[in-house]
């Protein structure tokens, strides 16, 4: 009996769609990400595609790993970009380092700490939550107290909390975690390339980031680094890593000397990251950090001049992510809409318990310029006056 084959041609059901409109507006990107990509990064993405096992591409991979080690501040050999956004970096660190039944202390003072707790729970961990008010840092003394209450296998904390704009001091926490024999995992999605992360100096065992913030490349890769203690923990796992795609025991063989195929790397995104790292290292890490702090200070001074108040105290304020209190009676979403449609400027609104209460202003990477800061201040002044 003949088999009837139904056509999958879209014209069989409806008229074909017209061409997808790619005439997109050029925005001034001053939200929580992505930041503006330098023209050199965009040009790099237009380079011809080659195979992900081509010798020329393998050499480019070596350069990317070396650049990431420099920016992370580490000698860790297992330093590479995962295929995926910053959240893939978060999940990579946790699914590779947590086994069911282990005790994990998650420090939570914003949305992304909550996400780490969620992932740790999905890995089968016994999750201990150490919380601080949103807008405040985690107290190192509280971390020590929590560690003294019984064996902890891993501690996770956010360096620059994107949802609140808090820059977390890490030195004392790294020392406390090391003294108690646990691993320290740090979220540096927003901080890497804007302020020093100093993985080795701060005794960080595993760290992850994203390409779309202070590195100023498009979203799509998640740089990670594993230190010797993290690698040893990975090597002695009793169970398989629960994610096949994020399993570093396999991915490390593609990035290592073996060059064993795991998945097809995003070639053009790797070009973008390579050029973004070139730009970071040409500017210099110290000069780049000074630029972020200088522009942030200029912006915060300007906020006060027009009657607005930063949400986070100066001593804990992340220079690349300034959160601003919404004045009483102001429709924060309406202000953001007017910034976008009248002035072509994108900023972010609050998340979670801060929804409707703050604006999130990104001064990250290529977007972190005095001209951008002054442009936004002037636009805010005009909108709020009207």
Image (tube, helix red, strand yellow):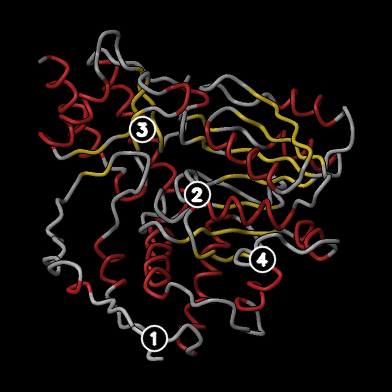
Query: Which residue sits at x=24%, y=38%?
Result: 346
| Quarter assignment of residue 298 | top left
The crowding category of the residue bearing disc 2, from other C-alpha atoms within 10 Å (few below 14, some 14 to 19, many at least 20), is: many
Query: Which residue sits at x=31%, y=22%?
Result: 301
Q: CA distance from mark 4 to mark 3?
A: 38 Å
Q: Are marks 1 and 2 in contact (CB under 8 Å)?
A: no
**Residue 165 percent across, percent down from the top left:** 46, 30
**Residue 309 percent across, percent down from the top left:** 34, 16
Q: Nearer the viewer, residue 328 or 142?
A: 328
| Quarter assignment of residue 179 | top right
> Which residue is denoted by mark 4 in the rendering?
247
> Which residue is denoted by mark 1 in the rendering?
50
Q: Of marks 4 and 3, which one's residue comes earlier in the chain?
A: 4
Q: CA distance from mark 4 to mark 1?
A: 25 Å
> Which residue is denoted by mark 3 in the rendering?
296
The crowding category of the residue bearing disc 4, from other C-alpha atoms within 10 Å (few below 14, some 14 to 19, many at least 20), is: some
Q: Nearer the viewer, residue 101 or 6?
A: 6
Q: Secondary structure at mark 3?
A: helix
**Residue 206 percent across, percent down from the top left:** 67, 53
Residue 120 horizontal side relative to residue 311, left or right: right
Query: Which residue sits at x=20%, y=39%?
Result: 371
The crowding category of the residue bearing disc 3, from other C-alpha atoms within 10 Å (few below 14, some 14 to 19, many at least 20), is: many
Q: Of marks 1 and 2, which one's residue comes earlier in the chain?
A: 1
Q: Are marks 4 and 3 in contact (CB under 8 Å)?
A: no
| Res. 192 mark | 2
Q: CA distance from mark 1 to mark 2?
A: 28 Å
């Amino acid at each position: 009996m003949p088999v009837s084959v139904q056509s999958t041609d879209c014209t069989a059901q409806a008229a074909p769609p017209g061409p997808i409109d790619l005439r997109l507006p050029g925005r001034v990107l001053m939200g929580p990400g992505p930041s503006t990509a330098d023209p050199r990064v965009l040009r790099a993405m237009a380079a011809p595609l080659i195979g992900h096992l081509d010798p020329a591409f393998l050499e480019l991979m070596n350069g990317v790993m070396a650049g990431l080690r420099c920016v992370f501040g580490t000698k860790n050999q297992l330093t590479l970009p995962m295929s995926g956004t910053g959240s893939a970096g978060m999940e990579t660190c946790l699914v590779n380092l947590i086994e069911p039944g282990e005790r994990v202390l998650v420090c939570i003072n914003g949305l992304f700490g909550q996400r780490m707790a969620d992932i740790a729970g999905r890995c089968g961990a016994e999750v201990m939550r150490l919380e601080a008010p949103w807008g405040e840092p985690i107290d190192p003394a509280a971390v020590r107290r929590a560690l003294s209450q019984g064996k902890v296998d891993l501690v996770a904390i956010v360096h620059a909390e994107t949802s609140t704009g808090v820059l977390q001091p890490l030195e004392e926490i790294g020392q406390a975690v090391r003294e108690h024999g646990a691993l320290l995992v740090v979220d540096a999605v927003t901080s890497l390339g804007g302020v020093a992360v100093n993985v080795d100096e701060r005794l960080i065992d595993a760290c992850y980031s994203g390409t779309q913030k202070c590195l100023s490349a498009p979203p799509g890769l998640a740089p990670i680094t594993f230190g010797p203690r993290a690698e040893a923990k990975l090597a002695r796992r009793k169970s398989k890593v629960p994610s096949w795609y994020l399993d570093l025991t396999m991915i490390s063989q593609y990035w290592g000397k073996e060059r064993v195929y795991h998945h097809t790397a995003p070639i053009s995104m790797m070009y973008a990251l390579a050029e973004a790292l070139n730009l970071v290292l040409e500017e210099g890490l110290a000069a780049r950090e000074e630029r972020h702090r200088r522009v942030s200070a200029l912006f915060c001074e300007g906020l006060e001049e027009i009657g607005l108040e930063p949400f986070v105290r100066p001593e804990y304020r992340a220079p690349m992510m300034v959160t601003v209190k919404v004045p009483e009676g102001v429709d924060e979403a309406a202000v953001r809409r007017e910034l976008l449609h009248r002035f072509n400027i994108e900023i972010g609104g609050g998340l979670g318990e801060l929804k409707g209460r703050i604006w999130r202003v990104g001064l990250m990477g290529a977007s972190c310029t005095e001209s951008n800061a002054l442009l936004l201040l002037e636009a805010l002044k005009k909108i709020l006056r009207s």
